[in-house]
Amino acid sequence: MTRPFKFIHLTDTHVVGAPHHLYGSDPRLRLEQAVASINAEHDDARHVVITGDLTHWGDQDAYDAFSQGIEALNMPVVLMVGNHDATEAFVETFPDAPRDQNGFVQSSLQTEHGLMLFLDTSMIGTHAGGYCQRRQDWLSAQLDNSTGPVLLFMHHPPFAVGIAGMDAIMMQDAAAFRDILAPYQNRIRHLFFGHLHRSLYGNWRGISFSCMPGLNHQVMLDLDAGPEVIHGNLHPPAYGVVLVSEDQLLVHQHAYLDNSPSFTLGPPEGVNARDYALGMAYES
């Protein structure tokens, strides 16, 4: 059987410069641990895609720390920007990162299972996302010039998710974005994004999507709070392990710091299944 195309989706690392912590957690350590996990458990992945908010304040010290954190990856990495990033400092640190003709951090990658499009939804002066006419023109050209399946990557979701504080800072040009995608909807296999700091899966206008938790901190599921507040917590981080083949696309969420007990569900030879299961439950 042919092995599926495999890549890693990681998002919202929110690195800060040493020795600072963020909300009581160390985002540099979280990133270091994620890189170690990817190298140890998924070294056959083609690449890692990080969908923005690489740093928390967008300062040079943070980008230097982020760069040091990812340099140990054993596979290529695609870097994207989010609302907590600063393009000038990003480019200073990663001068070879691809950008479009207008300087936006947008690029494409052709694979055997489709065209990957990496979009820049950041806007200066706000945490909300945007997609201006120049970026829309770039996306339209990319889609016009492609013929096969498409995988989309972005930081901000182009739709509301029911958490008012996050919905207030979603992509603000969502209607125009929808219109661009509409003629190609049957070719868009999946939409990957971050920004929400929590796991989310679903279907939007016929397009499947997934969002991974952040690495440092998460957004709580509070559907009653108003738009003026966003409640967070330090629930465990995770990254996505994506498997793509001709007839399916799977996203596994891997909580790489989970240290709960592991065991074989079936009993060893000669051991009663009931006694084994009850014994394991007792030991845990």
Image (cartoon, rainbow, N blue to C red):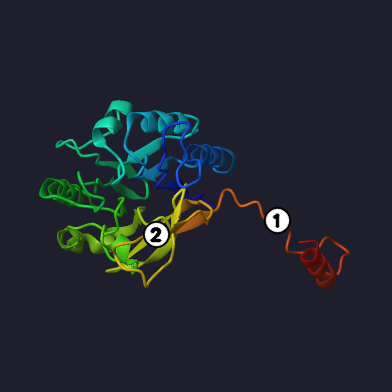
Element type at marker 1?
loop
The quarter of the displayed image where residue 220 is located:
bottom left
99 vs 56, nearest the viewer: 56
53 vs 16, nearest the viewer: 16
What amino acid is at disc 1?
Ser
Q: Position of residue 131 (x, y in %)?
A: 18, 51
Residue at 43 percent across and 47 percent down: it is: 10
Element type at marker 2?
strand
Q: Give the vertical position of 194 relative to 110 (above or below).
A: below
- Gap between marks 2 and 1 measured at Cα: 27 Å
Image quadrant occupied by the C terminus: bottom right
Q: Residue 262: which disc?
A: 1
Q: Position of residue 263 (x, y in %)?
A: 73, 57
Q: Residue 210: which disc?
A: 2
Q: Position of residue 187 (x, y in %)?
A: 27, 59
Residue at 50 percent across and 51 percent down: it is: 238
* Mark 1 crowdedness (10 Å alpha carbons): few <14, some 14-19, many ≥20: few
Horizontal side, residue 93 vs residue 13: left or right: left
Horizontal side, residue 183 vs residue 109: left or right: left
Q: Does residue 65 appear in this view?
A: yes
What amino acid is at disc 2?
Ser
